[in-house]
Image (spheres, grey):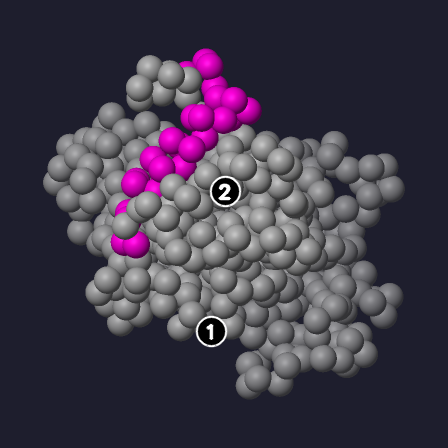
């Protein structure tokens, strides 16, 4: 992912009108909007609540929006300028004290104060809690190379950039209330106001009704915390809007053309749109994505801490594999947990490899194209993540050098220096193996013992440097002679029955302690024919099932 917008490939521009990938489907809506409104600049926006540190959902939202932006650039051949604004609602009141701060007691006096008025609890030299988290957000986004503009609600409110919209909100106050009140319960209706004044006494964000709204003077009157009525101008950061009206106001003020949000916002979308229209804006195109599920199928929640964090994912795999997970089926609820990582890693490298030989039309359907904003890199990855995990399971490596011993024998000339991406993958695989791979060996029955003995004899007849294809064919030849593993629904190469997948499942259960694995011939080639025979001997001697 590049920090600056990459140039467009003319062949990709030519193929873009027929592209079917979901970012193009969304981008076409934005193109129609831009043409209808006569816009020469299109604004993509993502929102962020800095009450906590950026998380995996933040990454997904910015990444997916970037994918739509790239598709838009291709569809318009960069004839319309684009900007991506990452907006931080840092003027929101601190409604509760986060669990991860050094001293909860120290922050108690600052409850309900704007996040940019709360001291930085980590004492890292930032003026406030909100600005600390904003800095973490920017560092987070910069780490992944996103091209974006950061925007602070505090800056926008205090600098006057929202002043005209706030005065307009006073002029159309009754219209806004007519939208909001039906969405509230009776008790809340009695005290609700879309305007939240900042108390001149305490500095807190006040959820109080307005006693007077004066659009002509641009002021509101309310009862402050000491019981006295106070009149404040809405300009200059003296007030902010409730979060739902704020959504619509921001769209109108910034001229936002596209924003995506999670399914939990979907019921509020009509409210955001109506507020935007009331304030004179045209609601943007939206994209509603599904929320992630944890390993138990429950929705991931920041407060619960279930699921997987971005730091946890990046402990075991690269950001590109996470980006692939984000790209695939964003409107389908998916389990986001550690067990999805290996598949995402290998699929990413598979897509990246395919990209190198594809024509423009096929490339636009390839996730690697979207992950890398049109410039998928080339990799030489002679070993997959799944194979590395099985190699680690079989060899119990204590250091990467042990793994590289097998890899270098399997692929002469391949070293950590010549293949740094593979070296990184070795590290990821070792950490994943250590933390998650459970070995559950089982002893072979009599039929399986005979099959393993025959397999060992067949391997003994192979060349020590036999490749994965030769090893796989030798294994298939053994299986074809055993009735249990004959698949009569398929025809083998010599006219006999094919081989059931149960044969290879047995090999992984007995020899590796796993339910399944990558192509067995590829594993045996990487591990080594002689080492695989020793593994079979250990299984036949009862050593492996005893380990499990």
**For this view, does 255 lie left or right of residue 211?**
left
Q: Is residue 481 magenta?
A: yes
Q: Classify 1 as above or below 73.
A: below
Secondary structure at badge 2 equals: helix
Instruction: Mark 2 or mark 1: name the one nearer the start of the chain.
Output: 1
**For this view, does 337 lie left or right of residue 522?**
right
Q: Which residues are magenta?
A: 464-490
**For this view, does 438 lie left or right of residue 494?**
right
Which residue is at 21% across, 31% downward? 361
Answer whether residue 186 is visible to the viewer in this image: yes
Q: Which residue is mark 1?
A: 399
Q: Is residue 451 magenta?
A: no
Which residue is at 66% across, 67% downward? 114
Residue 390 coordinates in the image, percent (x, y) = 49, 53
Front residue of 490 and 242: 490
Q: Which residue is mark 2?
A: 453
Report if the CB atoms under discs 2 and 1 are less than 8 Å apart. Answer: no
Q: Classify 420 as above or below 499.
A: below
Which residue is at 65% across, 45% downward? 443
Residue 86 coordinates in the image, percent (x, y) = 45, 57
Secondary structure at badge 1 equals: loop
Specify the quadrant that holds the N terminus: bottom left
Q: CA distance from mark 2 to mark 1?
A: 32 Å
Answer whether residue 73 is visible to the viewer in this image: no
Callout 2 environment at 10 Å: few (<14), some (14 to 19), or many (20+)? some
Numbered mark located on residue 182 in the image: none
């Amino acid at each position: 992912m590049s920090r600056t917008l990459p140039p467009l490939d003319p062949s990709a521009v030519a193929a873009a009108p027929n592209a079917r990938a979901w970012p193009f489907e969304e981008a076409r809506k934005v193109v129609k909007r831009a043409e209808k409104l006569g816009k020469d600049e299109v604004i993509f926006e993502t929102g962020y609540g800095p009450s906590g540190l950026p998380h995996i959902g933040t990454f997904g939202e910015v990444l997916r929006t970037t994918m739509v932006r790239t598709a838009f650039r291709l569809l318009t051949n960069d004839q319309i300028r684009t900007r991506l604004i990452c907006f931080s609602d840092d003027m929101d009141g601190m409604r509760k004290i986060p669990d991860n701060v050094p001293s909860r007691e120290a922050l108690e006096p600052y409850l309900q104060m704007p996040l940019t008025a709360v001291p930085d609890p980590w004492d890292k030299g930032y003026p406030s809690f909100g600005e600390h988290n904003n800095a973490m957000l920017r560092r987070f986004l910069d780490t992944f190379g996103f091209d974006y503009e950061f925007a602070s609600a505090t800056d926008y409110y205090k600098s006057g950039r929202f002043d005209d919209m706030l005065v307009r909100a006073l002029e159309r106050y009754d219209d806004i209330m007519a939208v909001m009140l039906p969405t509230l319960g009776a008790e809340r209706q009695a005290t609700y106001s879309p305007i939240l004044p900042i108390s001149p006494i305490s500095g807190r964000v006040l959820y109080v009704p307005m006693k007077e709204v004066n659009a002509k003077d641009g002021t509101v009157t309310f009862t402050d915390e000491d019981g006295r009525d106070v009149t404040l101008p809405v300009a200059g950061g003296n007030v902010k809007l409730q979060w739902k009206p704020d959504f619509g106001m921001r769209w109108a003020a910034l001229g936002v053309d596209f924003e995506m949000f999670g399914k939990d916002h979907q019921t509020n979308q009509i409210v955001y749109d109506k507020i935007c229209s009331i304030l004179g804006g045209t609601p943007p195109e939206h994209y509603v994505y599904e929320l992630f599920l944890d390993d138990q199928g429950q929705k991931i929640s920041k407060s619960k801490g279930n699921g997987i964090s971005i730091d946890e994912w990046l402990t075991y795999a690269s950001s590109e594999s996470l980006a692939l997970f984000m790209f695939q089926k964003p409107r389908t609820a998916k389990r986001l947990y550690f067990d999805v990582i290996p598949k995402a890693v290998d699929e990413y490298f598979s897509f990246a490899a395919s990209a190198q030989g594809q024509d423009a039309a096929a490339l636009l359907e390839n996730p690697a194209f979207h992950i890398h904003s049109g410039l998928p890199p080339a990799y030489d990855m002679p070993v997959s993540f799944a194979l590395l995990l099985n190699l680690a399971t079989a060899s119990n490596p204590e250091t990467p050098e042990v793994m590289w011993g097998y890899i270098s024998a399997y692929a002469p000339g391949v070293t950590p220096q010549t293949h740094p991406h593979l070296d990184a993958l070795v590290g990821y695989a070792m950490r994943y193996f250590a933390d998650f791979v459970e070995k559950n060996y089982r002893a072979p029955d009599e039929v399986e013992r005979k099959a393993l003995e025959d397999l060992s004899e067949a391997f003994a007849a192979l060349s020590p440097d036999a490749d994965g294809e030769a090893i796989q064919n030798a294994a298939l030849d053994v299986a074809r002679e055993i009735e249990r593993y004959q698949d009569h629904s398929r025809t083998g190469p010599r006219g006999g029955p094919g081989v059931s997948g149960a044969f290879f499942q047995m090999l992984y259960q007995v020899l590796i302690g796993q339910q399944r694995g990558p192509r067995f011939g590829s594993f045996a080639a990487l591990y080594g024919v002689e080492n695989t025979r020793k593994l079979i001997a250990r299984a036949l001697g009862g050593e492996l099932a005893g380990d499990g």
